[in-house]
Image (tube, rainbow, N blue to C red):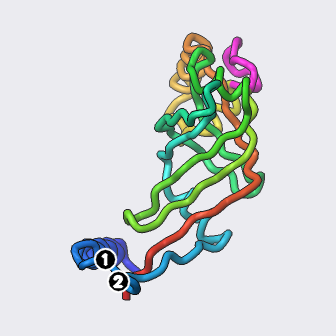
Amino acid sequence: MTETATKSQNQDQDQQGRELAQQEPGPGAGPAPRPLSEDELSQLLRAQQFGVLASVKRSGHPHLSTVLYHWDPAERIVRVSTTADRLKVRQLRHDPHAALHVAGPTVWSFAVAEGEAEISDVTTVPGDATGLELLAMTPGFDSPADEAAFLRQLVADRRVVIRIRVSHLYGTALDFA
């Protein structure tokens, strides 16, 4: 299916969903959510780059943070670059339970990756293990000088990697005929 056809289909699905939402609520007023398969969930995570990371505050309430992430389906790890002084880092060090919610291509689908988070060491030397892990999460650089500058900036920012070892993936989609 072409990108234009996919966009058109998504727009049609969104319109159908809006029409269903305007109907008087009642039994059978719309399609039931369809659980996504492991492959569909992994594809959704690969296709997106922004998600909402949920960590647990000391009060027990969730803390939500929009993040740029990288999904590694082979290792079942979500990686997030952040700075060592961020609240999410402190919370995940205290309670490693985490979830990443990722919206699908339409408002009618989503995926959630749950697991326990670990925090890398702070990158302290350009090109150290954490710096190289962060570098691997980027699309690449045009020149070695740009890459070296990026690695130096990671050190200046005191960057770390949040790794969520995913133990449970779930999500649904609403399919409109």
Mark 1: secondary structure? loop
Q: In the rendered structure, which segment of residues is drawn in magenta?
A: 120-130
How many marks are shown on the rendered structure? 2
Amino acid on which the number 2 mark rests in the picture: Ala
- Tell me if 22 is positioned left or right of 164 in this view: left
Q: CA distance from mark 1 to mark 2?
A: 6 Å
The residue that appears at 73% across and 30% down in the rendered structure is 95
> Which residue does the numbered mark 2 point to in the structure image?
29
Question: Which picture quadrant has residue 42?
Answer: bottom right
Say the numbered circle drawn on residue 25.
1
Q: Main secondary structure of the magenta part?
A: loop
Residue 8 in view, yes or no:
no
**Quadrant location of the N terminus?**
bottom left
Front position in the image: 23 or 114: 23
The residue that appears at 29% across and 71% down in the rendered structure is 14
- Residue 23 is situated, as x and y percent measured from the top left of the image, at 24, 78
Residue 35 in view, yes or no:
yes
The residue that appears at 77% across and 52% down in the rendered structure is 75
Proximity of marks 1 and 2: CB atoms separated by less than 8 Å:
yes
Front position in the image: 89 or 25: 25
**Quadrant location of the C terminus?**
bottom left
- Residue 119 is situated, as x and y percent measured from the top left of the image, at 73, 28
Amino acid on which the number 1 mark rests in the picture: Pro
- Tell me if 157 is positioned left or right of 15 in this view: right
